[in-house]
Image (tube, rainbow, N blue to C red):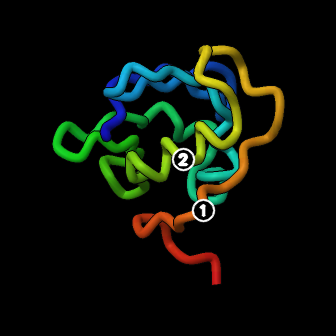
Amino acid sequence: MKLAAFERRVGFEFALTFDTGERVTVDLEPLIGNYISTEELSTGEIDPDWGCLQFHEGNVDIEPITLYRYAMGSTTTTGASASAVAQPARQPDRHLPSRR
C-alpha cells in the first residue's frame, strides 16, 4: 500500500488518496506536530519509491501503512472532514524519532 496523492487543506489537515482508491481527510497534527511546524508543511511530498508522505526531503516521513491506519482509525473514507481528533496508529512508526 502506498500514498497516491495528497492535498493540504488548512493547518495540519490533509486530504489523502491511497493507491487502493480510498480517500480520507484527516488532521495529522497529533502524528507529526512535534516534528514540523505549520510553516514547514509546504515541504510535503510523496516519496516516489516508498509511497510515503515526507517532509524536509525525507528527514520526516510517515510510513504508508502507518499513515493509512492512523487516517482510517480517525475518520471515514468518504472524503469528509474528520469530526474528531485522530488517534495514533497501533504500530509505532519506525521513521519518527522516539519521544523518550
**Which quarter of the rendering shows the C terminus?**
bottom right
Depth check: give the residue in front, 81 or 58.
81
Q: Which mark is residue 43?
A: none
The quadrant in which residue 28 appears is top right
Residue 49 to residue 25: above or below: below
Residue 57 coordinates in the image, percent (x, y): 31, 47
Residue placed under numbered mark 2 in the picture? 69
Residue 58 coordinates in the image, percent (x, y): 32, 52
Question: Hey, what amino acid is under mark 1?
Answer: Arg
Q: Are marks 1 and 2 in contact (CB under 8 Å)?
A: yes
For the point 42% across and 36% down, the residue is 43
Determine whether the residue tagged by mark 2 lies in a helix, strand or loop: helix
The quadrant in which residue 10 appears is top right
Residue placed under numbered mark 1 in the picture? 90
Q: Earlier in the sequence, mark 1 or mark 2?
A: 2
Q: On the rendered structure, is 23 left or right of 30? A: left
Depth check: give the residue in front, 94 or 37.
94
